[in-house]
């Protein structure tokens, strides 16, 4: 098969793990190519996510790199065997691939947690709020706003189709930032209250009264827990689009930020009371 032109973040992640596995023990691409029965260009394509790897070859790769059997290898094997088409694949080519990759990340995560300081997370947005957010996109991005809105609302079906623990830590500024005016904001806050009652959904608030904390300068920090900690992913929003973080040192930093934010946030019931009182301000 020809190399993939645009590998998804998940495909790239498998390649990253293959390269890390090889480099950890100092095996050269040439030696690995000879061991698994391929050539140097193919090894490069596998490590860049541009070419898949069979389960059999992955097991040989792991043995050659002294990677033992266990949960980590099982998770990588599962990634090689999943070749289904998913709903988000229908959006590829219609909008930036990195945005589509967020849905892929969410689907395969064991649990999700997000820290937002400027807006309500996409999985919790009402249609009116989402439309108002997209109205503020730069002109060159606004032309595909209807597709982005459709995609965002489709992502929200994860709570029904593929439910998993989801925690949203929302700074008070994100609850007060008005997208679409006071009526839209009030509707959004009421929707948050309703969602906070759903099993598996944990919505917490960090009020302005809390002193500065690590992570307060992050507009959005999204942590997707993998089947093993080595396969966790963090997605952050940048001005030019989403960025996915896989490096262990960075993951450790973002995990600490999330833990600290959770520790200083109001409890679940206090957060509901806070949101309920704030909704009245927009009446």
Image (cartoon, rainbow, N blue to C red):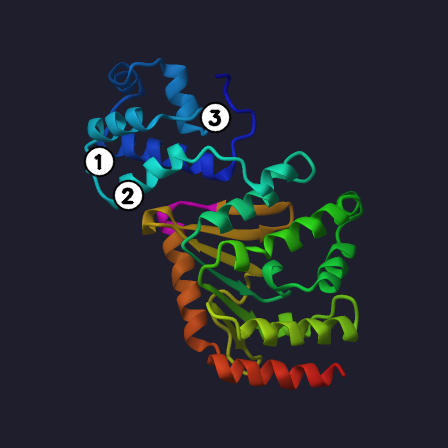
Of residues 8 and 154, the one nearer the viewer is: 154
Give neighbour class at mark 1: few <14, some 14-19, many 20+ (Cα, 10 Å). Answer: some
Q: Nearer the viewer, residue 115 or 209?
A: 115
Which mark, residue 198? Answer: none
* Mark 1 or mark 2, earlier in chain: 1
Residue under pointer 3: 50
Residue 72 is labelled as 2
Residue drawn 58% across and 47% down? Answer: 242
Q: Is residue 238 above or below residue 184?
A: above
Secondary structure of the residue carrying tag 2 is: helix
Determine contact: label 1, label 2, CB under 8 Å.
yes
Across and down, in percent, residue 2 comes to 51, 17
* Residue 33 screen position, x and y as percent: 30, 17
Q: Is residue 254 above or below residue 212?
A: above
Q: Earlier in the sequence, mark 2 or mark 3?
A: 3
Quadrant that contains the C terminus: bottom right
164 is higher (above) or lower (below) than 10: below
What residue is shown at x 39% (from left), y 37% (from top)? 79
Give the tally of numbered discs. Answer: 3
Write down the residue under mark 1: 67
Residue drawn 55% across and 40% down? Answer: 86
Region of the chain picked out in magenta, as a range:
245-250
Q: Is residue 132 magenta?
A: no
Front in this rendered view, residue 145 or 30: 145
Q: CA distance from mark 3 to mark 1?
A: 23 Å
Q: Is residue 4 left or right of residue 95?
A: left
**What is the spatial separation of the Cα atoms under label 1 and label 2, in whole angstroms?**
9 Å
């Amino acid at each position: 098969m020809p190399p993939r032109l645009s590998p998804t973040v998940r495909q790239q992640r498998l390649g990253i793990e293959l390269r890390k596995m090889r480099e950890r023990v100092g095996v050269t691409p040439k030696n690995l190519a000879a061991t698994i029965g391929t050539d140097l260009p193919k090894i490069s394509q596998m490590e860049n996510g541009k070419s898949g790897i069979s389960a059999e070859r992955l097991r040989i790769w792991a043995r050659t790199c002294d990677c033992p059997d266990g949960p980590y290898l099982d998770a990588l094997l599962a990634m090689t065997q999943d070749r289904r088409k998913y709903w988000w694949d229908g959006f590829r080519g219609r909008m930036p691939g990195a945005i589509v990759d967020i849905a892929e990340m969410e689907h395969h995560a064991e649990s999700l947690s997000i820290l937002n300081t400027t807006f309500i997370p996409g999985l919790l947005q009402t249609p009116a709020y989402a439309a108002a957010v997209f109205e503020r996109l730069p002109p060159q991005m606004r032309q595909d706003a209807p597709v982005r809105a459709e995609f965002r609302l489709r992502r929200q079906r994860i709570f029904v189709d593929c439910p998993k623990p989801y925690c949203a830590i929302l700074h008070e500024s994100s609850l007060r930032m008005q997208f679409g005016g006071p009526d839209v904001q009030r509707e959004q806050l009421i929707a948050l209250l309703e969602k906070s009652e759903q099993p598996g959904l944990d919505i917490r608030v960090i009020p302005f009264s809390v002193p500065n904390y690590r992570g307060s300068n992050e507009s959005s920090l999204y942590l997707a827990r993998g089947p093993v900690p080595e396969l966790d992913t963090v997605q952050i929003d940048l001005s030019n689009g989403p960025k996915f973080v896989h490096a262990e040192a960075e993951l450790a930093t973002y995990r600490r930020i999330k833990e600290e934010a959770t520790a200083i946030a109001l409890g679940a019931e206090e957060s509901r009371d806070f949101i309920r009182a704030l909704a009245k301000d927009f009446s």
